[in-house]
Image: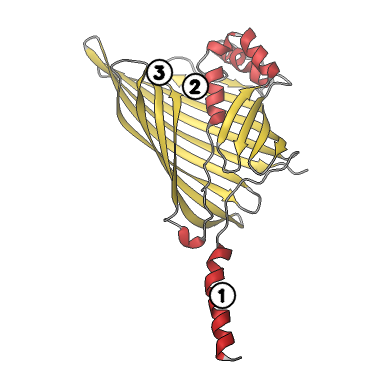
Amino acid sequence: MNHRLLIVLTLLISTSSPALAQRPLRWKLAAGDQLQVNVTQQTTSSVIIAGKPVKTTLELTLETLWSVDSANEKQYKITQTVKRLAVKMQSGGSPPIAYDSAAKNQPVGTAKEVATAVKPLLEEGSALIVTMDTRGEVLSAEPNAKLADLWKATTSKAIGGPGGIASSQELLKRSMVLLPEKPVAAADAGKAMWSKEREVEIAIGRVTQSTDFIYAGEVEEAGQKLDKIDFTSKLAIVPGGAKSLKLTLKEQAQTGHALFSAERGCVLSAEQTQKLVTEAPYRETVITVTVESSVKTVVSPVKK
């Protein structure tokens, strides 16, 4: 091999390798695809009034099926149906509340109220129509005609807990993770960063959520090569958005990560933890509320 040819080949290899290594991370869904998307959430809240704490724990399990109705190079339209919803709640010394839509026995007491609230979501033919782009951002989540009618006909539309319109849509509008806009390579681990800001309604009122993402590189899990994305979020109360005019956001932290399969073209799992501390004056005292939660989402493609 002459020196000139060797130089040309060396230049070709050195200039083309990074480009070949870089790849875009995008959801790749087709009409007719189905995904099992399960969410588990654990929340502990502590309210301190005049030095006396009241603790509440909540466990939520949500099992849903995504059916892809249409797909193009920009976005997907997905019918999301709720297959199972379970709630366990304990507040102070009150009797615990437990509800599971998969249970055969009829709910009693307060669990019966929860069953009434979530019933529209579980009715056959009820669904949320979700539009998501290829980076995983949920653009909209609206009830289909049947679910909209059921929500109008029941009191669940006024319930802020599981099954209410606001809580259900907010839970389903939460993107698992926003994928990077630009292609990434192994060398970009810890360097490639992007961000997203949105307004969201939570228990304390309307807030701005700013999320920073960072590509954490390739990892191997259960024999699969996956791309890991880490993220952290910050909250700021929107002017006039707090439900209490004198409410103060004292502490907030939210971190998490997601694992994306380039081979399957979907996120396989996402986890996040959050801590929120607020204070608000009440008569001669100050009410301090601390909320700590963890959310895990697992996605399993349904085999045809």
Q: Could you tell whether 32 is left or right of 284 in the image?
A: right
Q: Position of residue 93 (x, y in %)?
A: 41, 16
What residue did someone put label 2 on? 89
In the image, 64 versus 249, the foreground residue is 249
User: Which badge, 1 or 2, comes first in the chain's sequence?
Assistant: 1
Q: Depth check: 4 or 101 in front?
A: 4
Q: CA distance from mark 1 to mark 3?
A: 66 Å
Q: Is residue 254 left or right of residue 146?
A: left
Badge 2, how many Cα within 10 Å: few under 14, some, many 20+? Answer: some
Residue at the far right in the pictured view: 304
Kindly indicate whether the residue at mark 3 contacts the one at mark 1 (C-beta within 8 angstroms).
no
| Numbered marks: total | 3
Quadrant occupied by the C terminus? top right
Q: CA distance from mark 1 to mark 2?
A: 60 Å
Please tell me the numbered disc located at residue 13: 1
According to the picture, the residue beneath numbered tag 3 turns out to be: 92
